[in-house]
Amino acid sequence: MAKIYEALQWASSFLREKGRDENAGELLLRFFLHMNRTTLLANLREELEPEVENRFRGAVELHGEGTPVQYIIGHEEFYGRTFRVNECVLIPRPETEELVLGALERTSRLFGENQSVDVVDVGTGSGAIAISLKLERPVLSVTASDISEEALAVARGNARQLEAEVTFVKGDLLRPFIETGRKFDVVISNPPYIPIGDKVDMSVVVTEHEPHGALFAGEDGLDLYRRFAEELPLVLKEKALVGFEVGAGQSGAVSDLLRTAFPKAHIETVHDINGKDRMVFMELS
């Protein structure tokens, strides 16, 4: 039987050879041992049960082949909460937490703290954005949509688990709401925005495991934003907020699309914690 520190050393060396993040071994072992980091470090000289060691080694080898750690352990942290994920949904990223924060701040400023506001998260995936918005500001009336029934099943499960009252709708971008004549105060989205040509330079951890429909959007990555610019005028109320996550370097083009559709709107680009132009917000008032 291997000791915990020996298993970690093996995992670190194995993952380094495979070009993966060496820290993934610790995350996986903590998952199988049901330990936090402090407890794990305090027990480095304890021996692993053979069954746990076998499962751990199998998981490390799986990650070495490219499967994201989050899909192996089945969850990811987002905005201080645990969201279940599988290969039907994009893994929530830390940058997207900044989109949620920016949306909450602007919603409060535009509509007031305690006013009921109709919000829709388009392309919800795991439901991370919609559920976080609802739990952070319970007064919001939150709807979430996705074209994928499998993604919606994950999102509904997360909403139940986290006890968030969110309405889920299946449909392509804003079409289900255009068809029913529904209008919103706030539209938030982290749509696919990676140019298809970038796939060759991306890690197989992403390209061979995360859903392509949630990653890629045409030759320049702007296909979905073009559709938003066409469809938003049909679903926004007179006073409204739109918040997009964008790919680094896309904010100018996305701002131009919105400005063409809404010449009188206030549009701003917000940089993320890494200094990349990651969000575009538009306000109508």
Image: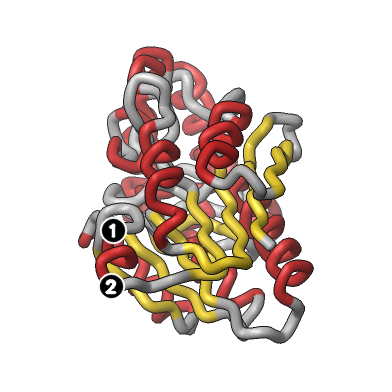
Q: Are marks 1 and 2 in contact (CB under 8 Å)?
A: no
- Residue drawn at point x = 53 percent, y = 54 percent: 30
The alpha-carbon separation of the residues under discs 1 and 2 comes to 9 Å
Observer-nearest of 3 and 83: 83
Mark identifier at residue 180: 2
Query: Mark 2 or mark 1, which is nearer the start of the sequence?
Result: 1
Q: Amino acid at mark 2?
A: Thr
Q: Amino acid at mark 1?
A: Arg
Q: Is residue 34 visible?
A: no
In this rendering, position of residue 166 left or right of residue 149: right
Badge 1: how crowded within 10 Å, few (<14), some, or many (20+)?
Answer: some
Badge 2: how crowded within 10 Å, few (<14), some, or many (20+)?
Answer: few
Seen in the picture, residue 78 relative to 141 is either above or below; the reply is above
- Residue drawn at point x = 56 percent, y = 69 percent: 185
Is label 2 in a helix, a strand or a loop? helix
Observer-nearest of 188 and 36: 188
Q: How many marks?
A: 2
Residue at the extreme front of the image, as rendered? 263
Residue at the extreme left of the image, as rendered? 149
In this rendering, position of residue 244 left or right of residue 102: left
Q: Is residue 222 visible?
A: yes
Q: Position of residue 255 (x, y in %)?
A: 60, 35
- Residue drawn at point x = 24 percent, y = 55 percent: 148
Is label 1 in a helix, a strand or a loop? helix
Seen in the picture, residue 62 relative to 73 is either above or below; the reply is above
Q: Position of residue 74 (x, y in %)?
A: 38, 57
Q: Position of residue 90 (x, y in %)?
A: 39, 47
Q: Position of residue 248 (x, y in %)?
A: 60, 27
Seen in the picture, residue 198 relative to 90 is either above or below; the reply is above
Observer-nearest of 229 and 99: 229
The residue that label 1 is drawn on is 175
